[in-house]
Image (cartoon, grey):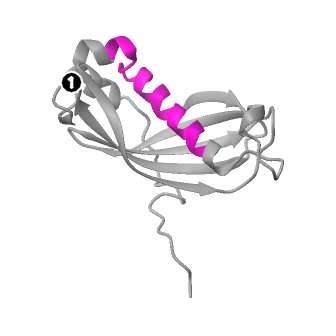
Amino acid sequence: MIIFNTQVAAEWVDYNGHMNDAEYARVFSLAVEALMDHIGLDESGRAEHGYTIYTLETHLCYQRETHQGEPLNVSLALLDSDAKRLHVFFELHDSQGRQLATSEQMLMGMDSTSVRPAPFPSAIQAAIEALPRPAERPAMAGRTIGIRR
């Protein structure tokens, strides 16, 4: 499921002539916002439910560089969820469908008043249950970092 579309902005390009590594994180952050909108936690939904989502952890892997003006799309797969958390996997692709990067994230549902973890409101939980789950775990999911010996 494509959750977010954008293009590489001029200010995202670094001294190497391609999108800076920090900007990949920006794109995935914007994809989380698009996910929130999709499940009913847009600005009005956050106000109505007194609820939001925080990012607990992210693992970003870079595969290819991209350049100014290049159209980008981010796809989403829900790997797992419980009453308060979402384990999501995003893939960033260019206009030719080549994978540029992935971001595996753990997201936590938060009560906006107490600023404490809280179960998803029922309407939000229903929208989460409708999110696509991959038939097979993506190969890039669950990776660890280290020097292979």
Residue 110 in picture, x, y percent from top left: 24, 33
Taking the spot 32% from the left edge, 15% from the top edge, the residue there is 45
Does residue 8 show up? no
The span picked out in magenta is 24-45
Q: Is residue 43 visible?
A: yes
Query: What's the residue at 31%, 18% (across, down)?
Result: 46
- Give the image quarter of residue 114: top left
Q: Is residue 140 left or right of residue 101?
A: left
Q: Nearer the viewer, residue 89 or 117?
A: 117
Residue 57 is left or right of residue 74, and the answer is left
In this rendering, is residue 113 above or below 149? above
Does residue 145 sit above or below 58 in this rendering? below
Q: Secondary structure at mark 1?
A: loop
- What residue is rendered at 25% in x and 12% in y? 48
Where residue 12 appears, x then y in whole percent? 71, 38
Q: Is residue 36 rendered magenta in the image? A: yes
Q: Which residue is mark 1?
A: 121
